[in-house]
Amino acid sequence: MNRLLTLAIAVAAVGGACGGAGPATSSPTAMVAASAAASPTQVPLAGSITVFAGSSLTDAFKKAGEQLRLRSPGTDFVFNFGSSSTLATQIINGAPADVFASADDANMQKIVDAKLTDGTPAVFVSNRLQIAVAAGNPKGITGLVDLAKTGLIVVLAAPTVPAGKYALEALQKAGVTVRPASQEVDVRAVLNKVTLGEADAGIVYVTDVRSAGAKVAGVDIPEQHQVLARYPIAVVKETKNARLAKAYVDYLLSEDGQKLLAEFGFSKP
Amino acid sequence: MRAARPPFAIAALAAIGVAFFALPLVGLIYRVSWQTALSDLFTAEALLALRLSLFVSIAATALGLLLGVPLAWIYARVAFPGRNVVRALTTLPMVLPPVVGGVALLVAFGRRGLVGEWLDAGFGLRIPFTTAATVMAATFVSMPFLVLTVEAGIRSIDHRYEEAARTLGASQWRIFRQVTLPLVAPSLFAGAVLCWARALGEFGATITFAGNLPGVTQTLPLAVYIAMETRPEVAIVLSLVLLLVSLAVLVALRDRYLRLD
């Protein structure tokens, strides 16, 4: 049901962007033209917003910010990346966020429960898990079962952050018990430990492995052990720039935004 | 000369300064849920972190004494070329962001590090993610406090005691043990306690170099950071404990050993 709702919101958002100018068509070029033409009477987007986002979104969100800045010169996007749970705590304690994107529903729900969202959060993208290993896979890791091998240094994200929670779910599905060498504060810290060669393996998102480039390789986790990570996003109620915040969210939900996210390895919601 | 009454502006600014430091403490006390404070403090994870922190901070202080006292003595007594540069190097962690210290430790002692690679290949010794790494991180950031305090102590000793011992035929080593060390006992104590308090509070270098695993590398500050996301009441109680311990240390030292005035 939640997914239906999301879809409805996504459709509404995209439709809203096009609605002002002529017939709504679905071809991407028409949409860009439409959104550009949509605002001859409107004041152009301006100012800056701060986006709080789960660390797995680091590269994709920066790129999205660049794209929007190109479209609307005079706008600026500041990012605060970290574990979704840390960010949720910060927002509840009054951190000046305009947009919040979480790697799981639970941490978004904290913000909703605190009545700090503007409208209902929309799931804008999803992600899957992968085992990050050193390039060339020197330890010959083929799946989750191998992570239980003695002598292998495995790091996971802390069970309090989404990536850690998802990793435990996947391990549980596979019936594997892993003794991690460390429970890192967010998924990017897990990736870093593998990139630096300090850890032999870590469970991260597919998108993290892709962003790490040549130093890290990914070992796939079979479908029956996979965990689908759904990422909700919302405008924070106390935003000082609701228009730009909404434009950022709308962009990610738009066809262009989805295409950009797919380039970083994210899947459709 | 004693000013009977400070000018209003100075008193007002000083009061704001005090409030700036006092309010966070008041805030913690205010937010502690006192009904559950004890049970929060004695949760399994808090106790594990408390025990590890005690061990790590005491081990770091012991290491600091072992290596830091000779260093302080050399700084105070031996004039060698480049002394200021070497002293600056060993004092660097006092002003360095601890995370930077952690990164530096990692690239030196990590599995792919300058020394770490050799330790791994030669002895199968891996430091990151172990309690040893936690002790190293704590020592790295806390030892400079001990070295500076003890060096100042040694410099303030009256030279004549040591010279008298020398004329009586005592060896350098014996003078150091039986004359110098007893004379600097107060600064030794103050330095050790400062070092211990700093080690107890270490976060950035630890999480970067040693990682975070309950019972192995998750010290109190790390446990506070992790708990803040899921069980803030535990984080607040633990923070209060750390704060009160540090405050007690400073008050005690100021009165008895740190003659700053």
Image (tube, helix red, strand yellow):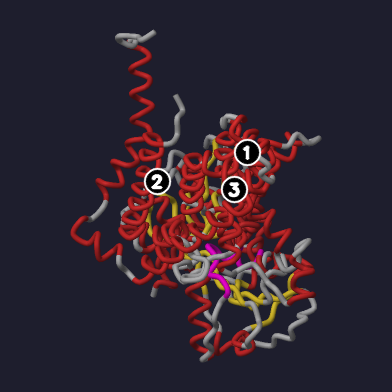
List x then y, in percent, for residue A225: 55, 87
List x then y, in percent, for residue B149: 55, 38
Question: On screen, A36 above or below B15?
Answer: below
Looking at numbered disc 2 in the image, what kind of residue is underneath it? Ser
Q: Which chain carries label 2?
A: B
Looking at numbered disc 3 in the image, what kind of residue is underneath it? Arg
Q: Which of marks 2 and 3 is nearer the N terminus?
A: 3
* Callout 2 crowding tier (Cα within 10 Å): few <14, some 14–19, many ≥20: some
Query: In this orientation, does residue A76 appear?
Result: no
Residue highlighted by disc 2: B246
State which mark lies toward you, 1 or 3.
1
Q: Which of marks 1 and 2 is nearer the N terminus?
A: 1
Mark sitting on residue B165: 1
Q: Earlier in the sequence, mark 1 or mark 3?
A: 1
In the image, the segment drawn in magenta is A181-192
Q: Report the side of A121 relative to A131 (left or right).
A: left
Residue highlighted by disc 3: B177
Q: Mark 1 lies on which chain?
A: B
> Looking at the figure, which quarter contains the C terminus of chain B?
top left
Question: On screen, A188 above or below B245?
Answer: below
> Gap in Å between the C-alphas at discs 1 and 2?
39 Å
Q: Report the side of A110 relative to B183 (left or right).
A: left
